Image (cartoon, grey):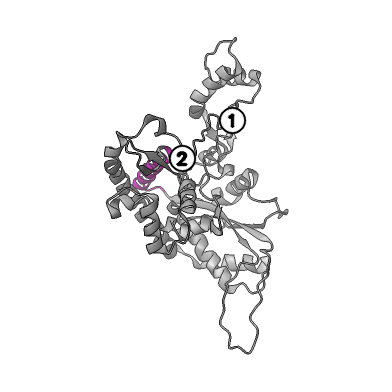
């Protein structure tokens, strides 16, 4: 809804008109302050015009990454390459429906108070359905076969090599989000805290000229200017070697990944049938639902995502036209700063923002990843 607000309402979004729209459409009960935090977590920021009017603008870098993503996936589809979406999720052993019918003669099933154990789920799918033999489930926090703890780069790369790649169609495009373990770098550039000798070595290896008398801040400034063109990720190398490409979702855009909707269906299936709160049974239920979701169901999910992509393309053009008259009035001091005035000149970890881990909580109003999908994000 936020991205399409310019199209549907013919005006720029503000906290006031957005809050009223959300209250009307999804019965949003949060305060204006809560909504501001949600918007910030979705990658929006405020800009002030010369008339002191604050308007809501999506961060330019996020828009750019979405535009680039949409152009690339359109090109891959025109090349008739298989598009395979991947993701990781989880189910708690206590995941069950809150209500059930009873004739009153027996007590209802008592749901555990705690969340219990957690099961990590990893899978991939596309227009043809889930990738055969690619489903991975393991208990979080313990060793399960070759898998330890929660999902991390080591576990994800092992899954790529042993379960995904052997079952991928040739010349596939593998879509991933921006979780940190998807962005582990090969030969990562030095950070501002690295040793001076390491900075100099990295610059020499890349053929970048520098003066031996340069101090660390000067060396790091050179590194910052050119490190992006040398950036390479582990999973890209693994998939490229097998003849596949990697496409990263733009930050804050889980709605562009159909497997998010598949997770929702799987979790609903588990919730309806989970009466034992046992991870073994939950694993069986997950496999049952995965086997029930074939090409027809996945085709519908992918079609829905293509419709969302089309909406973004349309709204991006309208946003440019709508904000054009305001852009010339925006003060230089406020044009690229966040609402809180914070900034960072050193992204040492070089990891893009993840779209699946944001949580906003304020005065009893909690917004999680699933809430965003079911609430605000479902309307984007």
Query: SS at mark 2?
Result: loop
Q: In this view, does 117 lie to the left or right of 301?
A: right
346 vs 235, nearest the viewer: 346
Observer-side mark, 1 or 2, equals: 2
Give the percent coordinates (x, y) of residue 287.
58, 65
139 vs 30, nearest the viewer: 30
Residue 319 occupies quadrant? top left
Q: Is residue 370 left or right of residue 308?
A: right
Q: In this view, does 26 lie above or below 16?
A: below
Q: Mark 2 points at which residue?
A: 339
Tell me if I can see residue 315 in this picture: yes
Q: Is residue 274 above or below residue 331?
A: below
Query: SS at mark 1?
Result: loop
How many neighbours does mark 2 have within 10 angstroms: few (below 14), some (14-19), or many (20 or more)? Answer: some
Can you tell which mark lies on residue 188?
1
47 vs 178, nearest the viewer: 47
Magenta stretch, main secondary structure class: helix
Look at the image and say whether residue 65 sits in the magenta stretch.
yes
């Amino acid at each position: 809804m936020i991205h399409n607000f310019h199209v549907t309402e013919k005006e720029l979004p503000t906290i006031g008109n957005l809050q009223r729209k959300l209250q009307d459409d999804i019965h949003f009960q949060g305060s204006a302050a809560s909504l501001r935090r949600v918007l910030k977590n979705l990658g929006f920021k405020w800009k002030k015009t010369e008339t002191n009017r604050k308007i809501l603008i999506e961060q330019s870098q996020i828009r750019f990454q979405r535009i680039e993503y949409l152009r690339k996936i359109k090109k891959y589809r025109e090349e008739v390459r298989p598009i395979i979406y991947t993701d990781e999720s989880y189910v708690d052993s206590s995941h069950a429906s809150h209500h059930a019918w009873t004739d009153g003669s027996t007590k209802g099933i008592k749901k555990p108070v705690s969340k219990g154990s957690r099961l990590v789920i990893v899978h991939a799918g596309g227009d043809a359905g889930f990738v055969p033999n690619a489903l991975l489930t393991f208990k979080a926090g313990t060793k399960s076969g070759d898998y330890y703890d929660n999902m991390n780069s080591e576990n994800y790369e092992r899954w790529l090599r042993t379960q995904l790649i052997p079952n991928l169609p040739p010349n596939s495009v593998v879509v991933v989000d921006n979780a940190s373990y998807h962005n582990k770098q090969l030969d990562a550039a030095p950070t501002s805290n690295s040793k001076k000798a390491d900075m100099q070595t990295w610059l020499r290896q890349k053929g970048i000229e520098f003066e031996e008398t340069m101090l660390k801040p000067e060396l790091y400034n050179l590194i910052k200017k050119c490190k992006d063109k040398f950036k390479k990720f582990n999973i890209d190398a693994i998939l490229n070697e097998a003849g596949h490409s990697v496409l990263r979702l733009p930050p804050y855009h889980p709605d562009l990944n159909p497997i998010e909707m598949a997770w929702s269906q799987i979790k609903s299936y588990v919730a309806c049938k989970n009466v034992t709160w046992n991870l073994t049974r939950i694993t069986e239920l997950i496999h049952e639902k995965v086997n029930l979701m074939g090409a027809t169901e996945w085709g519908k999910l992918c079609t829905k995502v293509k419709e969302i992509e089309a909406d973004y393309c349309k709204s991006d053009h309208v946003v440019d036209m709508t904000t054009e008259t305001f852009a010339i009035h925006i003060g230089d001091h406020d044009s690229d700063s966040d609402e809180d005035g914070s900034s960072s000149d050193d992204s040492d970890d070089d990891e893009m923002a993840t779209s699946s881990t944001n949580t906003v909580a304020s005065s009893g109003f909690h917004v999680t990843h699933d809430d965003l999908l079911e609430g605000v994000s479902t309307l984007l």
